Image (cartoon, helix red, strand yellow):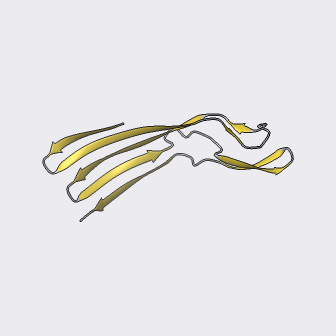
């Protein structure tokens, strides 16, 4: 969802929120090990002009803990990668 509003002739403010939902995922062929369903929330807000912008953002804003991928390392054990924790930042730029 995104909401934008014109604050003056040369600039527009905007706020964006999105939720991505991932279903249950099985890591092995016999479906013994799995990751339950989870969701990630991302937010972005900023101001945009005709040739410039400035914004702040957050990904995985609620710091959901998840394992997007895991492989069977040996019988009965898995080697997995943890998901990216909450990250945030700012960016600004110009375009021509």
Q: Nearer the viewer, residue 41 or 91?
A: 41
For the point 56% across and 46% down, the residue is 85
Q: Position of residue 72 (x, y in %)?
A: 79, 49
Outermost residue to the bottom: 96
Side of 28 where 36 appears, left or right: left
On screen, residue 32 above or below 57: above
Side of 22 where 54 appears, left or right: left
Q: Position of residue 24 (x, y in %)?
A: 65, 35
Side of 9 where 82 appears, left or right: right
For the point 42% across and 52% down, the residue is 89
Q: Nearer the viewer, residue 52 or 21?
A: 21
On screen, residue 74 above or below 26: below
Q: Quadrant of residue 7?
A: top left
Q: Position of residue 57 (x, y in %)?
A: 40, 48
Q: Quadrant of the N terminus?
A: top left
What count of labels does the image hold? 0
Outermost residue to the right: 75
Q: Position of residue 34 (x, y in %)?
A: 72, 38
């Amino acid at each position: 969802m995104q909401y934008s509003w014109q604050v003056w002739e040369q600039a527009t403010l905007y706020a964006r929120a999105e939720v991505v939902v991932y279903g249950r995922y099985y890591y092995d062929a016999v479906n013994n090990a799995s990751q339950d369903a989870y969701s990630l929330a991302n937010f972005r807000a900023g101001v945009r002009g005709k040739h410039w912008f400035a914004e702040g953002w957050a990904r995985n804003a609620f710091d959901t803990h998840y394992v997007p991928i895991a492989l069977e390392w040996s019988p009965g054990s898995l080697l997995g990668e943890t998901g990216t924790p909450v990250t945030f930042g700012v960016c600004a730029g110009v375009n021509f």
